[in-house]
Image (cartoon, helix red, strand yellow):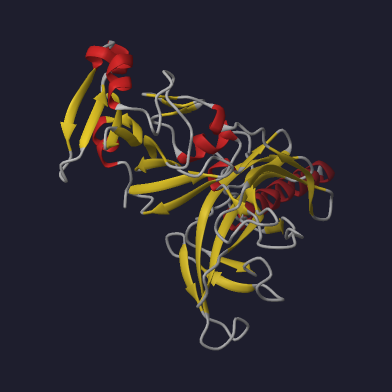
């Protein structure tokens, strides 16, 4: 009897102590982030990275030997440092941020930086890749080993796709002046387990606009309403833009005849202009040097006469078909011959350029 009573007392004591231990563990154990009470636990939540407002370690494409911290606010920063040098600084801004998945790395974020060392008349670009969760840096793409100016990224083309990081870049030819690269290439990078390496560098197929005809819709594959990036893509050639990109910009396409230009309003193509020495003509064969009589013989009742502010004659071809509404070709004449002509929207063609 005494033996049974002792066993019961011991059992109650063990149960009591076990209950106290469980209560203590429940009170003092930390709660896992992202877990749901009464449900199966989930992975801890990671705080989202504010990519536009954080500190990055940058070299501005090897402007300095070792990376220096650059703190960006709303994607921009003005940086001074002993490493940059006296009376010099960097103006840095983020050009593009893309997210995706790469083999052996998982989910990553690529950030393209533009750096303008001041005082100077050039800029550099630097592409770095980070862990999307937490923002730890993985690495950067290698600097291009080129004999002249570094190639220029087309930021809108940067993407993570098909297990690769890729972008279009404008490369400089041997005789290209600064600011006017003439070769558009698609470049891809992959992760080799230690660093990012270039996998391919391919020239994009070129369209010779000198062999294309101008219509109210544009020239060849270039269509009114396209962005500058779309124009580069369909022609395979870099655009050189001059003017305020947020408002009005004039563009010339590498490899096209002198005298052929494009006008963009808020990054939308609104006019294609042809003047001497370009020999490009309309789909009907009208071009620089065409006479007034030839224009009327060709376009008939769809062409009308106007006068410019300086009194010069201007003929406007406005096709009557509904699908061409708002699109025209404007011919400016001097002494009865076409001096230049513009195709596109009515307002833009009467101006012809932003300058």
Outermost front residue: 335
Seen from the viewer's position, the closer of residues 275 and 97 is 275
Residue at point 59%, 42% (across, down): 255
Res 265 seen here: yes
Q: Position of residue 237 (x, y in %)?
A: 59, 40
Horizontal side of residue 175 vs 123, given as left or right: right
Q: Position of residue 124 (x, y in %)?
A: 60, 64
Above or below residue 79? Residue 230 is: above
Q: Residue furthest top?
A: 321
Determine which quarter of the picture holds residue 236.
top right
Residue at 38% x, 50% y: name it: 245
Q: Is residue 38 visible?
A: no
Q: Residue furthest bottom?
A: 86
Judging depth in this view, the residue of 240 and 297 nearest the camera is 297
290 left or right, relative to 34 = left
Q: Position of residue 344 (x, y in %)?
A: 34, 30
Tell me the quarter of the image containing the N terminus. Answer: top right
Q: Is residue 115 above or below residue 31?
A: below
Percent position of residue 92, x then y: 51, 66
Q: Is residue 279 left or right of residue 158?
A: left
* Residue 333 against residue 353 in the figure, above or below: above
């Amino acid at each position: 009897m005494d033996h049974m009573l002792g066993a019961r007392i011991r059992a109650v004591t063990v149960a009591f102590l076990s209950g106290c231990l469980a209560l203590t563990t429940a009170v003092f154990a930390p709660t896992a982030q992202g877990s749901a009470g009464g449900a199966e636990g989930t992975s801890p939540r990671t705080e989202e990275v504010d990519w536009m407002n954080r500190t990055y370690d940058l070299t501005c494409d090897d402007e300095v030997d070792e990376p220096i911290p650059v703190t960006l606010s709303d994607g921009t920063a003005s940086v001074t440092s002993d490493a940059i040098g006296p009376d010099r600084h960097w103006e840095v801004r983020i050009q593009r941020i893309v997210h995706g998945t790469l083999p052996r790395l998982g989910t990553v974020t690529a950030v393209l930086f533009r750096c303008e060392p001041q005082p100077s008349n050039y800029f550099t670009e630097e592409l770095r890749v980070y862990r999307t969760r937490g923002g730890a840096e993985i690495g950067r793409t290698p600097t291009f080993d080129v004999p002249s100016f570094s190639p220029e990224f087309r930021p809108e083309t940067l993407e993570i796709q098909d297990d690769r990081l890729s972008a279009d870049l404008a490369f400089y030819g041997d005789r290209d002046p600064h600011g006017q690269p003439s070769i558009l290439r698609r470049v891809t990078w992959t992760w080799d387990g230690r660093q990012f390496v270039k996998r391919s560098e391919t020239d994009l197929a070129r369209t010779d606009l000198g062999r294309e005809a101008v219509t109210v819709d544009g020239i060849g594959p270039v269509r009114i309403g396209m962005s500058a990036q779309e124009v580069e893509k369909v022609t395979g050639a870099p655009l050189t833009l001059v003017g305020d990109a947020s408002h009005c910009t004039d563009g010339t396409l590498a490899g096209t005849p002198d005298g052929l230009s494009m006008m963009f309003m808020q990054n939308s193509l609104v006019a294609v202009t042809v003047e001497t020495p370009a020999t490009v003509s309309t789909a009907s064969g009208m071009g620089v040097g065409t006479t007034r009589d030839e224009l009327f013989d060709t376009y008939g009742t769809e062409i009308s006469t106007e006068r410019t502010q300086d009194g010069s004659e201007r003929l406007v071809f406005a096709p009557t078909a509904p699908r061409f509404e708002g699109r025209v070709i404007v011919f400016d004449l001097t002494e009865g011959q076409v001096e230049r002509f513009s195709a596109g929207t009515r307002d833009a063609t009467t101006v012809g350029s932003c300058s």
